[in-house]
Image (tube, rainbow, N blue to C red):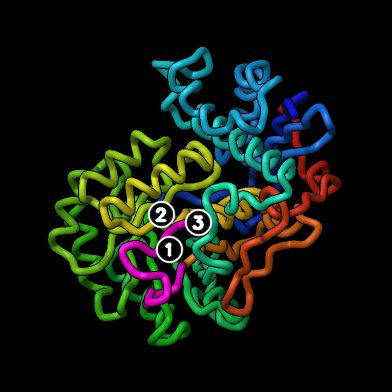
Amino acid sequence: MEVESVRAIPLEHSLSPGSAFGGTRGVTETRTATLIKLVSDDGTVGWGEAFAPPRTVAQLIDEEFAKAVIGLTPWDAESLADDVYTGTIGGYHFGRGPFVQSALTGIEVALWDLRGKLLGKPIHELLGGRSRSSVTPYASTMYITEWDQDPASPMQEAVEEEFTAAKIKIGRSVEDDRERVRIAREILGDDAPLMVDYNGNYTVSGALESIRAISEFDITWVEEPLPPEDTEGYRELGQKIDVSLAAGEAHFGRFEFTDLIRSGAIDVVQPNLGRCGGFAQAEYIAQVATTNNVKVRPHVWNSAVGVAAALQFTATVPDYPQRADLANEPTLFEFDRSENPLRDELLTDPLDPSGGTLSVPTEPGLGVEIDESAVERFAVGY
């Protein structure tokens, strides 16, 4: 089996006027994705997602990656990242860059999808077997919006969908942070895991003041309270608080992740399976993390393809250092609850996170079937 054709497909869905939402670093009026479609010489199709501005990364794939990918086999997935770091695509000067790493990830995941379909096995089995058959989805909700929304409404909706854990956006001011967390905790309940996400909007002193202000609400982790570049700030902050620090969604490739983990700056690392480098790089990141006693909980804010890839990867993450049968906390898996048909409509059988558990697909490859008519409905030119 060899790759015969490569297609990068930018997707876009425009939200209704006045419905922009997001976090402290800005809001968006669209949901986007870039799907990678590899077709082999026997007609088998492999899918991946590049989590980056769609038109830019699609053009990069068409102009720089496509010729090099034609003729590859599914067995070339593991070596693809090194080829990008050292070869003519990206190479020494650009291989570590975010757009190149995102493009690499989408193609690499699609190669694994092809491999799984060729062998008749889900990707988690090809990565060494699964540590779990299901995960606990947490509702990523209570976004910052451009309209005057009651912050309690989205959390109430999550509870009605039987989510047993949630993450909310904060980071505008200490007073606002505390009020949003208070509301979330009151609705979610005292025992449910509750995470907060600042999107890197504070300095060390500002983050410290905010974290202390919300400490009474039993936060599971605080996510990106500082900009991703401020590794020393994370180390300083971690020495002054008693809650776990999480980061990684804005990091790319194994070198950045290795530095982040080994710095001792974080407790939870969050690679995204749309831009961390692919499955092989994610497995490496997980090995470095467990070696340094850091938890692995992927960042997931993707289309259905990226969600499926993250599920396959999460199935393989060990409970180390705990024995699997004695693990005393759920394996939390992010599930965005904002309006996004690129997540909800691209699969013939959509993933359903409601009810408190989410099963890991066991069909070959990514374990999901893409509705290509839906893909074409949301496709845009560039």
Residue 316 bears which disc, if any?
Answer: 3
Structural crowding at the residue carrying mark 1, measured as other residues with C-alpha within 10 Å and reported as few (<14), some (14–19) or many (≥20): many
From mark 2 to mark 1, how far is it between C-alphas? 8 Å
- Which of the 4 quarters of the picture holds residue 355? bottom right
At x 41%, y 54%, the residue is 24
From mark 3 to mark 2, how far is it between C-alphas? 32 Å
Whether residue 188 can be seen here: yes
Number of on-image labels: 3
What secondary structure prevails in the magenta region? loop
Q: Does dot 3 land on a helix, a strand or a loop?
A: loop
Please say if the residues under marks 3 and 2 sit with CB atoms less than 8 Å apart. no
Q: Does dot 2 land on a helix, a strand or a loop?
A: loop
Q: Is residue 363 above or below residue 152?
A: above
Q: Residue 74: give x, y in percent of width and height.
A: 65, 33
Structural crowding at the residue carrying mark 3, measured as other residues with C-alpha within 10 Å and reported as few (<14), some (14–19) or many (≥20): many
At x 81%, y 27%, the residue is 41
Q: Does dot 1 land on a helix, a strand or a loop?
A: strand
Q: Residue 3: give x, y in percent of width and height.
A: 73, 26
* Left-right relation of 192 to 56: left
- Which of the 4 quarters of the picture holds residue 183? bottom left
Please say if the residues under marks 3 and 1 sit with CB atoms less than 8 Å apart. no
Residue 24 bears which disc, if any?
Answer: 2
At x 68%, y 48%, the residue is 365
Query: Which kind of residue does numbered mark 2 sit on?
Result: Thr
* Left-right relation of 94 to 66: left
Relative depth, front residue between 9 and 126: 126
| Residue under numbered circle 1 | 169
At x 27%, y 57%, the residue is 293
Q: Which residues are magenta?
A: 317-331
Residue 342 bears which disc, if any?
Answer: none
Q: Is residue 319 rendered magenta in the image?
A: yes
